[in-house]
Amino acid sequence: MLCLGIESSCDDTCVALLDGATVIAHAASSQIKLHALFGGVVPEVASREHAKRIGLLCRHVFEEGRCNPKDVGLVAVTRGPGLLGSLLVGVSFAKSFALGMGIPIIGVDHLHAHLLVAALEHSVEFPALGLLVSGGHTLLCRIEDPKNIKVLGRTLDDAAGEAFDKAGKMLGLPYPAGRHIDELSRKGVCDNTLFPRPYLNNDTLDFSFSGLKTAMQSHLSLHPLYGVGFDPLTGELIIPKGQEQLLYDLCASYTGAVVDTLKIKTARALALQEGIRSVILAGGVAANSFLRDAIETLAKEHGVAFYAPRLGYCADNAVMVAYLGSLLYTMGYKHDLAFEAIPRGRGIPNDMISIDSLA
Ligand code: KG4
Ligand code: ZN
């Protein structure tokens, strides 16, 4: 069955067409350049941009996939967590489409969609341990199946991606800085003593990354970097001569601290959770080369499989939304048209309707 997937939870407008596990077409329209001018996402601007772009993007995907809206049998849309105004654009668009075409709709948890997209291209063994690391979230989860996902630990303050983005801002790098810090780190040498591995001296699976940015600030106040910046039009990095190796090594040491911290807590979760058969790494920060290697090595050491989505499906996308929506619908679930968009900070209610109970 052809599923139309829609994602608008933050600053990317994304639409996808999926037939089972086959991606027919997908497209994303990033607002990064617009928000980069402000150094972070401006919610009001984001909603207005989604409203401007979503219809055109949808038409583009139908053209690219050589499909007709009448071919669609299911609409899946991100219902949360995210920026409320942004979510409402996607949810309203999806509801109108479903109502107009007389087809079922399902509202998808954005975080669950990130976690499950690895299963689109791999036959993942469950129960799985999921490590979700993005710009807004850091979660450790036990995934029994696509509907039963239990949070074991989460960040108490900054997310892993935020730790990269905030450090990047201090270093003079463009937003979002994660990708740049990753690339710069590859040319540097990690000094394990430079930054702490925060919030490990406890017996929870929670994280706290906010101290790391303070550590970066303190380091820079004693050892400032001079003239690092970027061209606001092209985003190209500007690194003055003599500052290169200092920047590379600093990035490598900071990346080391984030990656080690994530690895240590993931190892603790693996030791505590019974019957885990695989580890899934997901979210925008799952694109980080050091983290992918570290978690893959950890999984091997524990004798379980490792899965991560291909790089194109790590960041926000609508393929993951259409895929999870299709999985849940196949398991017998959907929503009625009254389901709500849920902003960040509020739990996503379990309010799906069983298709069998309607029959
Ligand atoms: O999942 P995502 O696209 O959006 C959210 O739902 O947050 O994640 C975006 C985050 C940003 O913080 C960005 O800096 C980070 O992912 N990121 C990376 C890398 N690529 C993106 N962080 C570290 N290394 C990367 N290669
Ligand atoms: Zn995301």
Image (cartoon, rainbow, N blue to C red):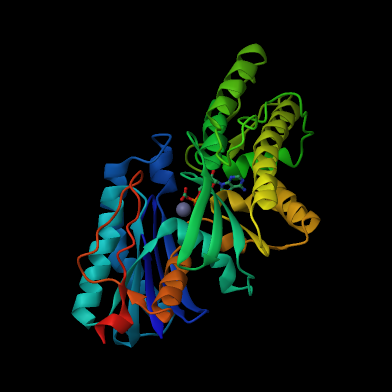
User: 233 or 332: nearer the eye?
Assistant: 332
Residue 131 visible in the picture = yes
User: 224 or 255: nearer the eye?
Assistant: 255
* 108 is higher (above) or lower (below) than 11: below
Quick one: quadrant of the C terminus?
Answer: bottom left
Q: Position of residue 67 (x, y in %)?
A: 38, 85
* 55 is higher (above) or lower (below) than 356: above
The answer to whether 316 appears left or right of 76 in the picture is right
Q: Position of residue 184 (x, y in %)?
A: 69, 39
Q: How many marks?
A: 0
Q: Position of residue 294 (x, y in %)?
A: 73, 49
Which residue lies at the image location 39% right of the left edge and 74% below the top edge?
61
Question: For the view shown, which residue lies furthest in the top direction?
Answer: 222
Q: Position of residue 9 (x, y in %)?
A: 36, 54
The answer to whether 138 appears left or right of 322 in the picture is right
* 292 is higher (above) or lower (below) than 236: below
User: 340 or 230: nearer the eye?
Assistant: 340
Residue 51 visible in the picture = no
The answer to whether 111 appears left or right of 292 in the picture is left
Quick one: quadrant of the N terminus?
Answer: bottom left
Which residue lies at the image location 54% right of the left edge and 42% below the top edge?
161
